[in-house]
Image (tube, grey):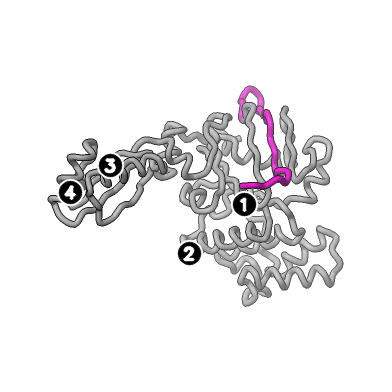
């Protein structure tokens, strides 16, 4: 990405402890403007603590942090003016209607009443809540509540939004609806900092992913870059008949037949160079496969490889 704008978030040497428990141990990362950055990690890894620090809810023990171009330590009010937060637990007042919840947010932002009503009407339409606008929020489904929660975050027109496990507990259709909303926000220039327990969610949405384990970042990169770090990828080759398959197997050497089909699997990291090598070897032998596809480990494999599959509840217990 050729982007010369300052980053939306820049973190260097972030530290945080609770008593003798080190939660964040000198972590560094940068989030470009208008992108989705996802922080993954087991329970207790420090994801929510990171969000709480970056959103000014708690203070760090050390490190240099810039959010929205403002220094977190010396300009917390300016940081708050640039961000919005949708936490793990909904901030919706269930005794109010959807419209009233949005009007309440307008009051908290000291917006003129007419502007607050206009923004509320726009957000109700944007989040497909018009029909339920004047119903009490306690009657909303889980997906509707999360949409309203995010809509409330947008009343202040934040440039950076922290989404801390925003789709927990939602059914698959509601989750995908939230994904579409998040993509639209980013297309409009908003930066998203996302924590999630759903690895598929990070894979679908994030431009870059960082994996937090035992207080340290153990990996960072695009989803594809992280997948290539884990062995188990392969190039799948399909053939028209067994003669072609046998000839290709002889040329490639380390290929294995898949389930007795007319298919070979060639170990590969999924990179362009390794795929090109397979194609060049087949071309040299004048063998043309009927189909070719690249398969890499998914983020589940990456997560388990980088964290050892461990999960603790220290952060939740705290």
Check contact, mark 2 vs mark 4: CB within 8 A: no
- For label 1, the residue is 89
Residue under label 3, please give it: 281
- In three-dimensional space, the C-alpha distance between marks 3 and 2, rounded to whole angstroms, equals 44 Å
Residue 245: numbered disc: 4
Report which quarter residue 256 is drawn in: top left
* Disc 3 to disc 4: CB gap under 8 Å: no
Q: Nearer the viewer, mark 3 or mark 1?
A: 3
Residue pointed to by mark 2: 173
Q: Earlier in the sequence, mark 3 or mark 1?
A: 1
Q: Is residue 228 magenta?
A: no
Tell me where residue 65 sits by quadrant.
Answer: top right
Q: Is the residue marked by circle 3 packed among few (<14), some (14-19), or many (20+) residues within 10 Å?
A: some
Foreground disc of the pair 3, 4: 3
Give coordinates of residue 71: x percent, y percent.
79, 38
Determine the CA span between mark 3 and mark 1. 55 Å
Q: Which segment did they paint magenta?
A: 1-23
Q: Residue at x 46, y 44 (%)?
A: 224
Kindly state the secondary structure of the residue where label 1 is placed. Answer: loop
For label 2, the crowd category at 10 Å Cα-Cα, with few meaning under 14, some 14 to 19 and many 20 or more, is few
């Amino acid at each position: 990405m050729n982007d010369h704008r300052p980053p939306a978030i820049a973190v260097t040497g972030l530290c945080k402890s609770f008593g003798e428990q080190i939660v964040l141990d000198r972590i560094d990362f940068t989030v470009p403007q208008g992108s989705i950055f996802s922080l993954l990690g087991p329970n207790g890894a420090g994801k929510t603590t990171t969000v709480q620090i970056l959103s000014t809810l708690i203070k760090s023990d050390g490190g240099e942090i810039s959010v929205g171009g403002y220094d977190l330590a010396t300009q917390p009010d300016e940081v708050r003016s640039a961000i919005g937060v949708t936490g793990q637990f909904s901030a919706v007042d269930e005794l109010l209607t959807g419209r009233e919840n949005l009007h309440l947010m307008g009051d908290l932002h000291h917006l003129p009443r007419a502007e607050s009503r206009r923004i509320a009407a726009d957000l109700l339409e944007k989040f497909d809540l018009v029909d339920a606008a004047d119903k009490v929020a306690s009657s909303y489904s889980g997906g509707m509540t999360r949409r309203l929660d995010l809509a409330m975050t947008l009343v202040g027109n934040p440039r950076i939004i922290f989404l801390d496990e925003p789709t927990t507990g939602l059914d698959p259709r509601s989750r995908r609806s939230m994904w579409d909303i998040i993509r639209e926000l980013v297309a409009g220039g908003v930066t998203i900092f996302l924590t999630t327990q759903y690895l598929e969610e990070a894979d679908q949405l994030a431009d870059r992913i960082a994996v937090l384990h035992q207080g340290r970042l153990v990996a960072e990169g695009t989803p594809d870059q992280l997948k290539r770090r884990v062995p188990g990828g392969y190039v799948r080759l399909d053939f028209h008949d067994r003669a072609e398959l046998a000839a290709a197997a002889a040329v490639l050497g380390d290929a294995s037949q898949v389930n007795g089909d007319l298919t070979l699997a060639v170990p590969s990291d999924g990179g362009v160079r390794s795929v090109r090598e397979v194609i060049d070897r087949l071309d040299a032998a004048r063998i043309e496969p009927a189909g070719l596809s690249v398969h890499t480990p998914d983020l589940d494999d990456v997560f388990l490889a980088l964290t050892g599959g461990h999960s603790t509840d220290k952060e939740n217990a705290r």
